[in-house]
Amino acid sequence: MTLYPLFLLVAALTVLSPGPGVVMTLTNSLRYGMKGTFGGILGISVGALAVAAISATSLGILLAASALAFTILKFIGAAYLFYLGIRLWRAPAMRFQEQASRGAGFGRRFLEGLSLQLTNPKVIFFFLSIFPQFIDLSKNYWTQFAVQVLTYSSLVVVIHCLYALFAGTARRWLTSERGGRAINRLGGATFMFFGAALIAAKK
């Protein structure tokens, strides 16, 4: 899997970039503490598996049969990443509310994370138009699919746990306008970076 290192980088940057899942994890950490984030993080990870199963598998046959389809999806994916990057860069500062709450049930947080990820356009587009670029169609499709999807879901758990730890040690900065704006700018630059990397990548 010669494309795996690049996939690992792009997947990690995708998970790291600010979006609905990251906002949920940071907010849960500020409200409930580290322990209260686990349900939501696992829900987000399982949601990624579900989105992958629905979207990426259906594209395997199409991409194997059509080089044109592969190229079209490549540029659609890159254009979408640039769109997300510019929109996030120009967006108002994210604000994370720090407030006490009486309940942080694991099941409730899990369902919230799952439902959020199933409707998250960033993840849907990743598996529809970006993920297929890292599949080598001369090799076993299903082995590559399993390895890369499990990699993505594992990255969700690891990176979101790091976000939760970060929120606990940077409460004042995260709840400030300056902190929210910095996260927006970092996320926007990240999207545009791997949008360009996607265009440059070879099949």
Image (cartoon, rainbow, N blue to C red):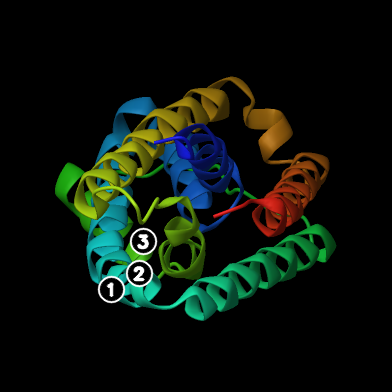
Quarter where residue 144 is shown: top left
| Quadrant of image for the N terminus | top left
Q: Which residue is mark 2?
A: 64
Mark 3 near mark 1, Cβ–Cβ under 8 Å?
no
> Residue at the location (30% across, 68% down)?
60
Residue 81 seen by the camera: yes
Q: Which residue reaches farthest left? A: 107
**Dot 2, crowdedness within 10 Å: few (<14), some or many (≥20)?**
some
Query: Which type of secondary structure does the marked residue at label 2 adopt?
Result: helix
Report x, y in % for residue 56.
32, 65
From the image, tell me which residue sits under label 1: 61
Circles 1 and 2 in contact, beta carbons < 8 Å: yes
Say whether disc 2 or disc 3 marks the residue closer to the N-terminus: 2
Which residue bears the numbered disc 3? 117
Name the amino acid type tagged 1: Ile
In this view, the residue farthest toward the front is: 138
Q: How far is the residue under mark 3 from the one under mark 1?
A: 25 Å
Please rate how many residues cluster around mark 3, counting C-alpha atoms within 10 Å: few if below 14, some from 14 to 19, many from 20: many
Q: Along the polypeptide, which appears first: circle 3 or circle 1?
A: 1
The 10 Å Cα crowd at callout 1, few under 14, some 14 to 19, many 20 or more, is: few
Q: Position of residue 100 (x, y in %)?
A: 43, 41
Which amino acid type is shown beneath numbered disc 2? Ala
Q: Is 19 situated left or right of 164 in this image?
A: right
